[in-house]
Image: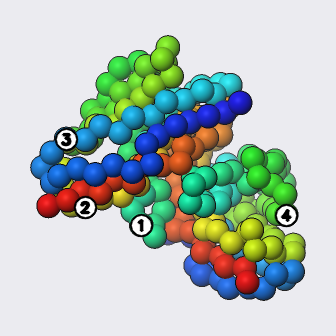
Amino acid sequence: GQNIDQPTEMTATEGAIVQINCTYQTSGFNGLFWYQQHAGEAPTFLSYNVLDGLEEKGRFSSFLSRSKGYSYLLLKELQMKDSASYLCAVRDAGKLIFGQGTELSVKP
Amino acid sequence: DAGITQSPRYKITETGRQVTLMCHQTWSHSYMFWYRQDRGHGLRLIYYSAAADITDKGEVPDGYVVSRSKTENFPLTLESATRSQTSVYFCASRRILAGGPEGTQYFGPGTRLTVL
């Protein structure tokens, strides 16, 4: 079966660092995506990992361990505008399988 | 650069009526996808299309019909709407390349559908 798990909600403080975890069990694996989705808007692409290790893009980093079926998204220097849902998605045979998403609230 | 658009953005209908949600992309992407998003379920794939006249079922296809006569359009039809189809519907597209970030899916703004 296909299963992708993320925490439902997280809260963090402006200026802090937060790590959003994602574990997956899928029949195939061709890469892992993170999307950001603000309330009432479409998901937008944040990062992509296909090999083990860390990918850094400004304040956002994403890590992958294929042997453990594990990824995380790290957000540094949190800003109020980072309040959103963060979706983990595994690509399997060209299709994306999404987790339920993690709703992040950034407090002043 | 219009990208990917959906219409209508909001729709209220009644049980048993037929409803068609439209999706249009200007990138000439080969692949197009329809998802529904519900609290507690995340994004679930309804149907997808690899090219004009080629469509295939996703995870939750029952009660939905799609067609793709032109590369740029991918309409989704609810033949007889039910309350359980109340949801937010997203259309997405990507280029033919499946590898790397070039295979990223890009999403339309969504259609919020309410079935009374």
Can residue B91 be seen in the rendering of this structure?
no
The x, y position of residue B112, in whole percent, is: 60, 75
Q: Which residue is under mark 4?
A: B63
Among the two numbered marks 3 and 2 on one chain, the one whose residue lies closer to the N terminus: 3
Q: Which residue is mark 3?
A: A17
- Mark 4, other Cα within 10 Å: few <14 / some 14–19 / many ≥20: few
Whole-Å distance between the Cαs marked 1 and 4? 27 Å
Q: Which residue is mark 2?
A: A81
Q: Position of residue A56 (x, y in %)?
A: 27, 32
Label 3 to label 2: alpha-carbon separation: 14 Å
Measuring 66% from the left and 33% from the top, which residue is drawn there?
Answer: A2
* Amino acid type, mark 4: Gly
Chain letter of the residue beneath label 2 in the structure image: A
Give the residue displayed 75% in from the left and 74% down from the top. Answer: B83
x, y percent for residue B53: 84, 54
Image quadrant holding the C terminus of chain B, namely: bottom right
SS class of the residue under badge 2? helix
**Nearest the camera: A80 or B58?**
A80
